[in-house]
Amino acid sequence: MIAMEKAQSTDRIEKHFEVRAPRSKVWRAIADAQQFGTWFGIRVEGAFEEGKTVRGFITHKDYEHFKISFQVVKMEAERYFAYRWHPYPSDPNYDYSKAPMTLVEFTLEETDGGTAVTIVESGFDQIPLARRAEAFRNNDGGWNGQAKKLTKYVA
Amino acid sequence: MFAALADATRLRLLKRLSTEGSQSITRLSEGEHVTRQAITRHLYALGSAGLVRHKRQGREQIWDLDMKRLEKARQYLDHVAAQWDAAAARLKAFVEESS
């Protein structure tokens, strides 16, 4: 079964799960843009290459008009694949190209049973206005900690 | 929106609303080294940024953090997390099918 963990933080989403397949096969499924598109649901134009930006189109009919852009940050063969993009659209009417980009990271590790996959998407704190209010509701970090976090976002 | 937070007074106001709960401009002005007028301006600026909201109670305006925005942000994150759950399941199915 897939074991899923959601990080407590509001800045990131983290998923851990294991698949019964060799790491090289899982790597190809992620790093090969055409294979990626097959299961991910986005038709990618061209190949994933470090430093390059590739375009993609969502294959779901309500979201076909969205222009998806993958800015490939790093590719470490069979171990790590990272790209930046605008967050996956949840509302067909919202212009996500205005939203700050998030970072998506795939990390693969060999296990006895096959491959452990970790997916992290981070950078959401830049997006929701209400995050600023939340920093005060949860006073765990103390006033100084929160103030530092917030002044980071000050123009 | 970020400019709304540039001011230390505004940060302080948010902090007070968080720890002390909703309150009037009168109370929020207490202990502050800025005028009540300035406090009012700051609160309206924070309101425009969607961080606080107010309602009238008798002769006072009562201000509070805007929790609805916070809830929307949480819902959005939950939605994105669900998208990744589905994507993870599809990746798993894709690589596990016998070649």
Image (tube, rainbow, N blue to C red):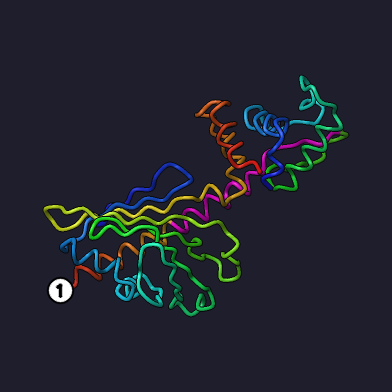
Horizontal side of A52 relative to B90 (left or right) equals: right
Q: In this view, does B29 lie to the left or right of B11?
A: right
Span of residues in magenta: B60-80
Residue sitting at 77 percent across and 35 percent down?
B62
Indicate the quadrant where residue B60 lies: top right
Q: Magenta stretch: dominant SS?
A: helix
Seen in the image, is A42 located left or right of residue B97?
A: right
The amino acid sitting under disc 1 is Ser
Q: Which residue lies furthest to the front in this view?
A: A51
The residue at the far left in this view is: A112
Residue situated in front as seen by the camera: A148 or B59: A148
Q: Tell me the quadrant of the picture where the C terminus of chain A can be found.
A: top right
Rendered location of residue B84, percent (x, y)? 38, 60
- Quadrant the N terminus of chain A occupies: bottom left
Q: Is B14 placed above or below B78 here?
A: above
Q: What element carries label 1?
A: loop
Q: Which sits in the foreground, B99 or B16?
A: B99
Vertical placement of residue A21 versus A151, above or below: below
- Residue A39 on the magenta span: no
User: Label 1: few (<14), some or many (≥20) within 10 Å?
Assistant: few
